[in-house]
Image (cartoon, grey):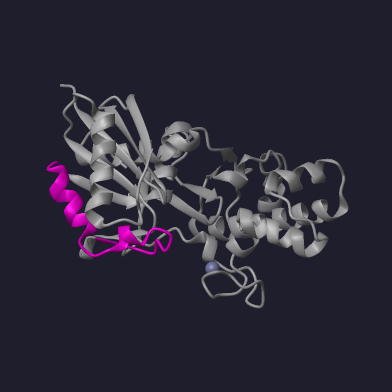
Amino acid sequence: MKQYVIGVDLGGTKVEACLMDNQRNVLARYRRLVRTLGEMDEVLKDIDAVIKQAAGNQSFSAVGIGTPGTYVAEEDRLFGSPNSLIYETPGFIGKLREMLTVPLVVENDANCLALAEYFASCEDKYRYVMGVIIGTGMGYGLILDGKLYRGARGGAGEIGHTTIDYNGRLCGCGRKGCAEAYLSGPSMCRRFYEASGQQLDVPGIYALYRAGDAQAIELFEQSLRIMGEIFANVINALDLEAIILGGGVSNLPIWYERLGPFIKKSLFGVPRGDIPVIPARLGDSAGVIGAAYLALRHLGVMNF
Ligand SMILES: [Zn+2]
């Protein structure tokens, strides 16, 4: 029997939805800007419109939704999405459930992305994988023994706020030395500006690195070292097999060409081969695809 689900990616400024069948085929996608600063009812109406547009005439059995922040099931509420506070409002998820009338599964967007990318490049190959997203922030989704790992309250995945130096750079979270304070796109730009006085975006700094600029080389050598240490910390703690990298910063070839040895030299314990660092493949579709997988899992079609 054919079954259909909807995946939704709830962003800070836009909402995207896809229609997926039970063979994991994406049949339609639709995206539009939303008024996340408006009244709750207006925002809900926008989300409903995006879902209806993606579904067309097809009826569907469940909806999965990827959100900024962390979904805490006991309170049926999101926490930690300071850029889109409306989503955190108590009752928001409940109203969304009422509006949809079919089962709704809610999950953090980094987890959705990691799930989609895991099935795109690691299924049948690896069972212990982290999908790291480095863009304006840094987070990850963990797949352990082929299952999405959420932790006790759904808060697993804050790799960006693990520290490499308790006297290090001040992070937006208030702690010092967090990975995000070095490796997010804005942090890399700030570090380069402090060293060189030049205001460039990450691809601009990378172009200087390729051209042999000493300060750009220094920045990337340090960044490789930091990323290698952070990833090795997680691999040593959880015994992972592979890393998927996504997000804006991940688009540079340097991580795939050079990061491996930086990780390997800090691994401890059991013998391990090279830990593959795999580029994300799905681009900005990953969020909606992972969200739709949640709905398929709810229907018993997928197991993770
Ligand atoms: Zn932090």
Asked if residue 237 lies left or right of residue 113, the reply is right
- Taking the spot 23% from the left edge, 41% from the top edge, the residue there is 48
Asked if residue 191 lies left or right of residue 36, the reply is right
Asked if residue 282 lies left or right of residue 229, the reply is left
Query: Percent from the top left, x then y, of residue 80?
Result: 39, 64
The quadrant where residue 136 appears: bottom right
Q: Which residues are magenta?
A: 77-102
The quadrant where residue 91 appears: bottom left
- Taking the spot 37% from the left edge, 38% from the top edge, the residue there is 32
**Vertical side of 21 occupied by 136: above or below:** below
Query: Percent from the top left, x then y, of residue 287?
Result: 40, 41
Asked if residue 16 lies left or right of residue 194, the reply is left
Q: Nearer the viewer, residue 42 or 247?
A: 42
Q: Is residue 78 magenta?
A: yes
Q: How many marks?
A: 0
Q: Is residue 302 visible?
A: no
- Taking the spot 19% from the left edge, 25% from the top edge, the residue there is 58
Quarter of the image containing the C terminus? top left
Quarter of the image containing the N terminus? top left
In which of the image's four quarters is ligand 1 placed? bottom right
Query: Percent from the top left, x then y, of residue 248?
Result: 58, 44
